[in-house]
Amino acid sequence: MSSTYGNKIKISVFGESHGGGIGVVIDGLPAGETVSMDEILMQMARRAPGKDKTATPRKESDTPRVLSGMLGDTLTGAPLCAVIENTNTRSGDYGNLLACPRPGHSDYTAYVKYHAANDIRGGGHFSGRITAPLVFAGAVCRQLLAKKGIQIAAHIAQIGSVKDERFDPVDIPAELVDRLSRSSFALIDTGKEAPMRDEVEAARLDLDSIGGAIECAVTGLPVGVGEPMFDGVEGVIAKAVFGVPAIKGIEFGSGFDLSAMRGSQANDTFRYQEGKVVTTTNHCGGILGGITNGMPLIFRAAVKPTPSIAQEQQTVDLQKQENATLAIKGRHDPCIVPRAVPVIEAVTAIALLDLL
Amino acid sequence: MSSTYGNKIKISVFGESHGGGIGVVIDGLPAGETVSMDEILMQMARRAPGKDKTATPRKESDTPRVLSGMLGDTLTGAPLCAVIENTNTRSGDYGNLLACPRPGHSDYTAYVKYHAANDIRGGGHFSGRITAPLVFAGAVCRQLLAKKGIQIAAHIAQIGSVKDERFDPVDIPAELVDRLSRSSFALIDTGKEAPMRDEVEAARLDLDSIGGAIECAVTGLPVGVGEPMFDGVEGVIAKAVFGVPAIKGIEFGSGFDLSAMRGSQANDTFRYQEGKVVTTTNHCGGILGGITNGMPLIFRAAVKPTPSIAQEQQTVDLQKQENATLAIKGRHDPCIVPRAVPVIEAVTAIALLDLL
Amino acid sequence: MSSTYGNKIKISVFGESHGGGIGVVIDGLPAGETVSMDEILMQMARRAPGKDKTATPRKESDTPRVLSGMLGDTLTGAPLCAVIENTNTRSGDYGNLLACPRPGHSDYTAYVKYHAANDIRGGGHFSGRITAPLVFAGAVCRQLLAKKGIQIAAHIAQIGSVKDERFDPVDIPAELVDRLSRSSFALIDTGKEAPMRDEVEAARLDLDSIGGAIECAVTGLPVGVGEPMFDGVEGVIAKAVFGVPAIKGIEFGSGFDLSAMRGSQANDTFRYQEGKVVTTTNHCGGILGGITNGMPLIFRAAVKPTPSIAQEQQTVDLQKQENATLAIKGRHDPCIVPRAVPVIEAVTAIALLDLL
Amino acid sequence: MSSTYGNKIKISVFGESHGGGIGVVIDGLPAGETVSMDEILMQMARRAPGKDKTATPRKESDTPRVLSGMLGDTLTGAPLCAVIENTNTRSGDYGNLLACPRPGHSDYTAYVKYHAANDIRGGGHFSGRITAPLVFAGAVCRQLLAKKGIQIAAHIAQIGSVKDERFDPVDIPAELVDRLSRSSFALIDTGKEAPMRDEVEAARLDLDSIGGAIECAVTGLPVGVGEPMFDGVEGVIAKAVFGVPAIKGIEFGSGFDLSAMRGSQANDTFRYQEGKVVTTTNHCGGILGGITNGMPLIFRAAVKPTPSIAQEQQTVDLQKQENATLAIKGRHDPCIVPRAVPVIEAVTAIALLDLL
């Protein structure tokens, strides 16, 4: 597998959802910096399940234990390892998945690639649960970014047919960034929470699930982060974001809307504002030639609906080699978008710290 | 900069649009395989400019010279270096760009990052011209993939308001793949060529440019290519595709449309068909858990309009530190989408060969 | 820091000698292979301290706990994480090291690089104790190599003035390899154990330490492992071996003796033997042009004396910025060579599995 | 193959000795720095053959042409590509090598790994000639290091039975460094030139070749370069040095002599000298815990005798599958040590610039 990421900051994620524990090793952190464990736990709580009806009723303590790399709240410069024990597991729920792969899930491809050895219980290493260590790592990285004035905030851009407002791409208030980056149901227009929850509840009652989208902004980036071509900011962030399960698309700035635009419209005009070069629009999402231009970095990510649904589904039986019908029991989120918001922020933080 | 890509197959691109030459080193190719230079030249001709009014009138011979790695038409296993001399250059056209960055272009970010040292003439290393070596490298890689039965074809999905048909995601005929992969204005519905050219011509007459989108399909992939998490197929291809200038978004399968879907709709049902596991739909774009599932791999990429337009534009003068007006002379494509099609195919070939 | 190694098999080591725990994440292992935990524990026992007077009296349980990547004795293909808890620590012993760096140790360079943040207690991440996870990882890798017929064995080539016999470079019996690879005081000529122990005991009684050398052989390698130039077998193994603390030199085959040889003597003559190409001598150590030639791979590594000695030593006081005198208390091996033997075997196994 | 090196500074070497040309791409160089082409040519002249009887009579012009990455004498920040055309080749000399591998050379391992595809003419990619691009790259890197006060100098430590003096490990005069780094037969004690040349001439008259050793020193390094464990300075330099053909051993500081030392002797005592921490001896070669300590970095490398000798040698015929006799014609150095000195300096410069 390839559960490592990064060049200067190297992240190595391990764990299967129903194994002994999950965790992350972060190599390359600067010695002597302080990190608040409270901030880390706050971020992990945003991702944790069981908070309400949009999420799986499975409760995890998810308390990370730091084995190395910190002395008190200070980074020692040695690799930081954090482990989260797996306690609340019900493997019995996953009995027949090995034979009958869940549509839309990685059961089939993992079966072919890793054979019977794949730990199918709870999705194995493919489980959304391994995003917990990513949030831990991101929570460390974002604190280091914050000391340089760089802030990251994402929100639920869309769930089903309900859309939140979008960021004003040239003016993102610090208060908004702060609020979103602490919210567990992050919205610019909080009035959209009720209709979004309705959409999720309707899917749940239909034994179904629902997809969505997340918009993420980074403020305070200096000009000049990123490299042209293969280490351009778009490519580096995309690789990190596609490392999050269920993400199927990413667009920067005006993204796919640029397909129908003219250059005269898409080109962001440069202006001097208080002695600083700014752009009056931000169709490029803060990135020109793979390099940040000092404006907010903005991207959107598409989140597919949770593939594990309670409805009976058609699939195949790989042992009998015939078509089959599957009813998934287990406990699953009808909509993972709210919990995916801090995960997207986390991998963005990891990617940017690696680039800086 | 970071102009290298890959782990097993390592690509190192060099050259500035108006320097002595451009080229690529490909390390890790298998010894003893034969490669057709005619196929390579055919692919490079698809990207070459000057063919018609959609493209820049600048004519480049673009004939690559292989310095190493091939004996006749056989790969030796040593790094393959191909060089394309730069002959037809008119640097005078780029006189005032160093002071006045073109909106939408990398002039400003490159200026801040690389200072006056950046070779601004013709866009330097950021120029679209350095996609020529990428097409060379891709043309080698796709021939090696073809021997394993893997074919890559892309088409112009959209230019401005005109859209081509989309691939049938579960049934892509070999004839279509073959035709597209040799076409210089690749369309599924060739009836869309005229309205697309009209769109481009209208932009050109307005001294403007126009954006678009490209859809790419890969057929014949085995089940099991890619790794979960950070070396998932989505992330690896995205990093390669965002290495192409002007790409601002990528989506796999149904991509952003998944945001509004239910799981019962988005999950691709598994069925046995002639003893083989297939899916009846392909919303996942042939990738589950970062790993190919044996169905066609399909993605779409958003292409922003060429930032270099002949209209007068507002910008800044970085030397005088004041607002300024800019009129770009030079020679520029009003629409780069047709020429970007073989480039997208090329980087996809490079990414997949690296994964296999 | 950089505690990661490898391309296909990625090793990430973490832990400080007196932190919460130490361990390793191994990414890229093949799914479905079985691994014997008894074999792993046997290898770890060879490295464990406290067995006799050559080693530190500190006793560690060193029992690894596997958090992920194994189901029973089968590799799942997911990253394997093993953690060893730190239990028996006496941090008080290390009080004044932060101010007064131990000569020959990394205290000073770590102080400058990581400042006060470095966890000096027990040597922090620089401690020899973090070789325990390396032995764990190597014990997994060597079992996978053994299934391909590849065996690794090292022995104490030298301690102080006492030298063991050297391997017959063209004929290394399987029985010898087997015996050495399980021995905790590995010698070809076991009659050298007594004089070597005498040498160590003499150093210990003088409150001193003693250096040595280790010779390592790999049998059963196919022809063709390794790549010319920067991924040649010599370079890849050297990078792994220099990752082990206290190693200051490595030579392959006849190594530095080649400096005084003629080509007619150093060239290993090729011959057919039972239909197979062999060499009649093995001055090249089984590697030609960075690639294995099918003969035993043989190298020697120089081990410096343990820098922590009980004698009073001259050093500096970095806080008072003046010369100072230091007496190290703690518990330290007078000779680490016997315990380093399985570590050298381990990193060799990791390096070779990564190359294969 | 793997002809790439580095993380921040990425070197990609290409070319076969008798192909169209050889060269190097250097990615990651800082924009705006100036580099003297005269200095580069001076370094390349040191490595060039045909100067005297120690070297092959083959004359190469070896004039590099810079295709990209420089404007005048200024680095643009884009990848620098330099090409050296191959002009003076006599492939006919290498007729029967494909069938009958030269003892001590990579013919056999390359044959097995790359089959008939390997370009055997002149050793293909394995040829010593591809060290010319390494010297080019090193000549760029060392100029950048020199601006930080870091100097690199190596000398012929040994040829056959004749040894040069060794560096005073704690005091290496700038004049000596300067003289050696420009010399084409670099010796501390120039009185050793005559006996060394006699040794080489004696080997040549016997149709034989002779090995040697090179000692290399780096002065002006700050404290704190390198990372513990796998990116320790020893490992990083070793990987680069073993990338040079014919190198079979490397030792840092007192190296293998440490095997017989006591800790009290090997530990380098710290002292304050003019307000700076120094060591009174330098057995560690300037590296503690993988990190530079501010003292001169010193290592020695073993060079095997040129395997191509004019004497008739026993080998095998891989086509007839029987033992055979081989007489190599071609033109070959009886001793490559003098020409290898600037190559060792070059790869050291590349490795250190990558680490900094």
Image (cartoon, coloured by chain):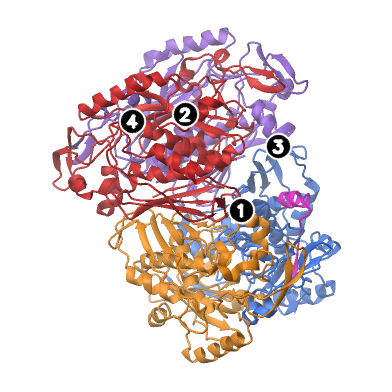
Chain colours: A blue, B orange, C purple, D red
Residue A37 location in percent, x, y?
78, 46
Is residue A144 one of those drawn in magenta?
Answer: yes
Instruction: Specify which label sits upstream in the sequence, 1 or 3.
Output: 1
Q: Which residues are magenta?
A: A139-157
In the rendered structure, the answer to whether residue C25 lies left or right of residue D38 reads: right
- Residue where numbered disc 4 is placed: D304
Q: CA distance from mark 2 to mark 1?
A: 63 Å
Q: Is residue A168 visible?
A: yes
Q: Residues within 10 Å of mark 3 (few under 14, many from 20)?
A: many
Q: Are marks 4 and 1 on the same chain?
A: no
Q: Are marks 4 and 2 on the same chain?
A: yes
In which chain is the residue bearing label 1?
A
Instruction: Report the Cα–Cα distance between label 1 and label 3.
Output: 31 Å
Looking at the rendered image, the quarter that the C terminus of chain B falls into is: bottom left
Q: CA distance from mark 4 to mark 2?
A: 22 Å
Say which residue label 2 marks.
Answer: D180
Q: State the CA–CA distance, disc 3 to disc 2.
A: 41 Å
Q: Tell me residue A231's x, y (percent).
A: 58, 58
Residue C237 visible somewhere in the drawing: no
Give the label on residue A76, or none.
Answer: 3
Chain on which label 3 sits: A
Amino acid beneath label 1: His
